[in-house]
Image (cartoon, rainbow, N blue to C red):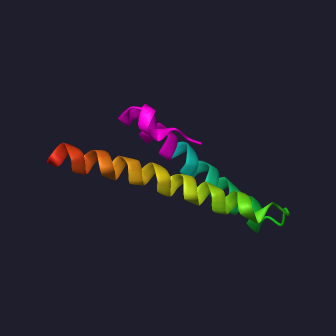
Amino acid sequence: MLELDKKNNTELEKMLIEKREALSAFRFSGAGGKTRDVKHGRNIKKDIARVLTEVNLRNSKSLN
């Protein structure tokens, strides 16, 4: 698993940027005609959602 609760905010932001770049590269490689595992793109999107959820939880806790 990603163990997001053990990472600080800067590490989460860095991970989010890396995952978004990976998703972009995955999409462009698919458009080029390379056959790839479709589940890989889905898993990247789920990882991005997990990171964003953790960031939003931390932001909501800091507001209270």
Q: Nearer the viewer, residue 60 or 30?
A: 60
Say left or right for 52 vs 62: right
Say left or right for 35 vs 4: right
Residue 44 placement (x, y as % from top left): 62, 55
| Residue 9 is a magenta residue | yes
Residue 57 placement (x, y as % from top left): 31, 50
Q: Where on the picture, by quarter, is residue 58?
A: top left
Residue 39 placement (x, y as % from top left): 73, 62
Q: Which residues are magenta?
A: 1-16
Say left or right for 40 vs 3: right
Q: Nearer the viewer, residue 56 or 32?
A: 56
Taking the spot 47% from the left edge, 38% from the top edge, the residue there is: 14
Task: Name above or below for residue 54 compared with residue 41.
Answer: above
Taking the spot 56% from the left edge, 58% from the top edge, the residue there is: 46
Task: Name above or below for residue 45 compared with residue 8.
Answer: below
- Count of numbered labels shown in the rendering: 0
Residue 56 placement (x, y as % from top left): 32, 52
Q: Main SS type for the magenta part?
A: helix
Taking the spot 65% from the left edge, 63% from the top edge, the residue there is: 42
Q: Can you say which quadrant of the picture contains the N terminus?
A: top right
Residue lying at the far left in this picture: please name it.
Answer: 64
| Residue 13 is a magenta residue | yes
